[in-house]
Every structure is written in structure tokens, then in C-alpha cells.
Image (spheres, grey):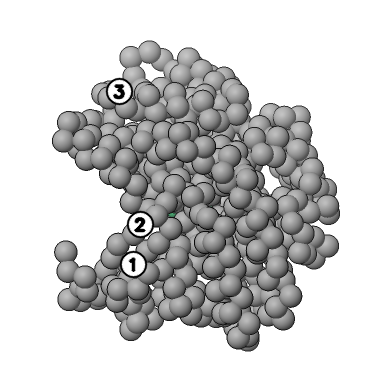
Amino acid sequence: MKMIPESLERHWMPFTDNREFKREPRLFVRASGMHYFSSTGRRILDASSGLFTTPAGHCRPEIAAAVNEQLQTLDFTPSFMRGHPGAFALADQVAALTPAGLDHIFFCNSGSEAVDTAMKIALAYHLARNEAQRTYFVSRERAYHGVNLGGTALSGMVRNREAFGALLPGVLHLRHTLLPENRLTRGLGAAGAELADDLLRFVNLVGEKRIAAVFVEPIAGSTGVLVPPRGYLERLREICSRFGILLVFDEVICGFGRTGDAFAATSFGVTPDLITMAKALTNGAQPMGAVAVRAEIYRTVVESAPQGAPEFFHGYTYSAHPAACAAALATLEIYRSERLFAKARELSGYFLDAMFALQDLPAVNDVRGFGLLAGLEIKPAAVPGLRGGELQAKLFDRGLHVKTTGDVAIIAPAFIASRADIDLMGSMLRDAIAEY
Ligand SMILES: Cc1ncc(COP(=O)(O)O)c(C=O)c1O
């Protein structure tokens, strides 16, 4: 494949300033370990694990070999009424990582699909329990739950909603948890557990048995790393249990070691009823998402349906695609054999030190972080978000890949990062932000 495409015009790029990109393309042509390589031959340190996808580092030969072998052995199996062994093996392995009890796994192809699948599972579960009137969903301001229509309705980010009409009716948003009292707090903030009581207000507003599920990211990632206040998730759990509401943790970013455990649910000691996941499930090497559900939810939906037909009318042509399963199985083997979740936990202190050290820069508004995930919020220019976009371009040109949202840089190194890699991320960020 040519290093520089003849035309950049026809590919309509997602979540991209297409006009700017096509004026000044920043193309990756190769990757290895902690680095990308640009079409201009430059080596770029990856400070965001691609898009939070690649904690084991880029281009792992074990994953490539597994996918290659799978595609030469069994390239595709219809996902409806047919199966292949890899899907069942993977479900077992994912279930072994999720908190006890969340042991049934529904596969899909992305985080967005995982979210919409979880919404449908919640509705199917309540219908099966003769509580079909539970049709409300609760989400949160500043939430990101992907881009399908269900997830867009749950979204708490205005730019992701405003162009898309009325969306789903019956979605209520908890207040977000970004509080000035918790500014520059490392880990969980002391203030704000009571924000979970918004859920009680919704119960009082729409009725005790009207809410199907509450969706939250344990750490809200894409909006700029909002670590939950201490006690907040526990309180949500308690209210959900009291009123028969399903609690869904969207762990598309947090899952697979980012918080130092397999799932943030374990790190925070709060067990939801469902977990959505994607990204690091295959180390980013194949598109794949999944939903883990409590056994009782699976059993209720399956056992209440008449025999002789599918119990749950939902699924994707590419659910549990053989190549994605092969990539995921090889990825989980790397996580295990290289103890990568423990490595993430061990590196976290050093990483957070490096990120919080940047708070002396006049342009830094806030630093937040947990595990190997940190948000660096810089002071906005006249138009909010402009500076964040400019910062990521500037960093790319200096050799650092960073994902920004608005004016927040989201730093999420691969778990194979060395201390020297973290030092370099810190110094490049410092030099670039110091110019504001
Ligand atoms: C919490 C969360 N949910 C859902 C998604 C959507 O995932 P995808 O882009 O794979 O559809 C993302 C993506 O960043 C996410 O962070």
C-alpha cells in the first residue's frame, strides 16, 4: 500500500475536522510497541494507547499470528444458530475476569454496540419479569456511551446530541461529578457522593417501577477523565438495588486493566449488573465489543421465552467473529502471561506523579487521574476546545500522540510503558503546554 494516498477526499473521517486534516494530514503508516511511525518517517510516542485500545503495545506478533491462523482455518461462521469454539472459550475467559456473578457474555463489534445491546438486554429482562413499564433509562451529564442511537440518547455531551433530533424519549441525566472542590485531586475526590441521590429524585419523579437501568462510566473517560467521588458508585448501587433498577458500568475505556484490575468494578469494589466493554478486549487489533451480564438476567430472559425460537431478538452478523475471538484470546493470554494488569497498577503511582507534576504550569486548570488514566485540563482560549485541538496537533508534530477532548488531554499509556516513556510524555507535555 502506498505511504501517501493519491487522494484524501473520499474518506469521510469520523469525529475529525476533515477540512483541517486534509489540508495537513497526519497519517500513521506503521506501529510497534509504544510507537507509531508517520508517513513522513517520524517516530511518535503513543501516550493514549491509540484510542485506549492497545495496552499491550502495538503490533503484537502473537495476536497477528492468531488472527492469521484463524482466517486461514475458519474465516467466518454465521453468528445466528451456528457457533465456533473460540466464541465459547472467549466467553469463559472474559467471565473469569469480570466480578463474580457476571458470567454470561454477549458479543458485538464495538463499544457503541455494547451499549445499545445492554439497553435492549435491560428492557428484555424487565419484560420477562412482567415489568414492561420500566422503560426509562438514566445516564449522566458529560457521559459518553458511543454513537448508536441508544448510546447517543444516553450521551451527556452536547455536541454529540444536538444534531440528532429528539432521540429516545425517557432518558434522564444525573448531574456530572466534576466538582471544583475536587480540583487537582489524585484518585477519588472527597466531595460529591450525594450527587448519586439524583437517582432518588428520578424515582420520585417517574415512579418506583419505571426505570430500567442506570448507565455510568465508572471513570467518565471521553469527557476528560472524571474520577468518581468517594462513595458515589456505592450509593448508586444501593439505590439501584433498592428499586430493582439495573446498574450498568460502561467499561469500554476502564476495562482490561486501565484501573489496575481487570475491571474498574473490582478496583472500586462495586458490582454492577451488566458491564459493557470493547477496545482493549482485542488490544485494538480487531473490532470487538461485549456485554457481561449477571447469570440471573440471562436465565430470566432465556427461560421466559417460548422454546423453538430465539429468546432474544438481537445480534450482529459479526457477533463473536472468529478473527476477533482469536485476537481477544491471544490478547488475554498476553495480559495473563505478562501480568499486565498488575504492571498497570505498579506503574500508576509513577505515572500519576508525572501528570500531577504538570499542575505548576499556568495554563493547567486541573489534573485528574486514577490507574493509568489521567486528564490534563488546560485553560480554554476564547473558543473552548480550540486549544485542545491545537495542542494535540502540536504534540503530534513534536512526536507525541495524545487524544484530546475539548481542552482536556487524555493520557493513557500502554501498560508496557517504561518509566523513561512516562518521563518523556511528561516532558513533551510540559514543553508544549508551557507555551500557553
Ligand atoms: C465509555 C464508552 N462507551 C462507548 C464507547 C464507544 O465505543 P466505540 O467507539 O467502540 O463504538 C466509548 C468509546 O470511546 C466509550 O469510551
- Counting residues from the N terminus, which is met first, the one under dot 2 or under dot 1? 2
| Disc 2, SS | strand
Q: Position of residue 224 (x, y in %)?
A: 61, 62
Looking at the picture, which amino acid does disc 3 mark?
A: Pro
* Residue 429, image quadrant: bottom right
Query: In the visual, does 199 lie left or right of 330?
Result: right
Residue 210 in picture, x, y percent from top left: 66, 36
Q: Nearer the viewer, residue 125 or 337?
A: 337
Three-letter amino acid code at the position of disc 1: Phe
Q: Secondary structure at mark 3?
A: helix
Please state the horizontal and vertical placement of residue 47, each as a whole percent of the image.
Answer: 50, 62
Task: Identify the residue position indicated by label 3 in the image.
Answer: 85
Q: Quadrant of the C terminus?
A: bottom right
Residue position marked by numbered label 2 in the rendering: 32
Task: Please tell me which of labels 1 and 3 falls first in the chain.
Answer: 1
Is 51 placed above or below 22 here?
above
Would you say the beta carbon of the disc 2 residue lies within 8 angstroms of ligand 1? no
Kindly indicate whether the residue at mark 1 contacts the one at mark 2 (C-beta within 8 angstroms): yes
Q: Camera-side residue: 65 or 194?
A: 65
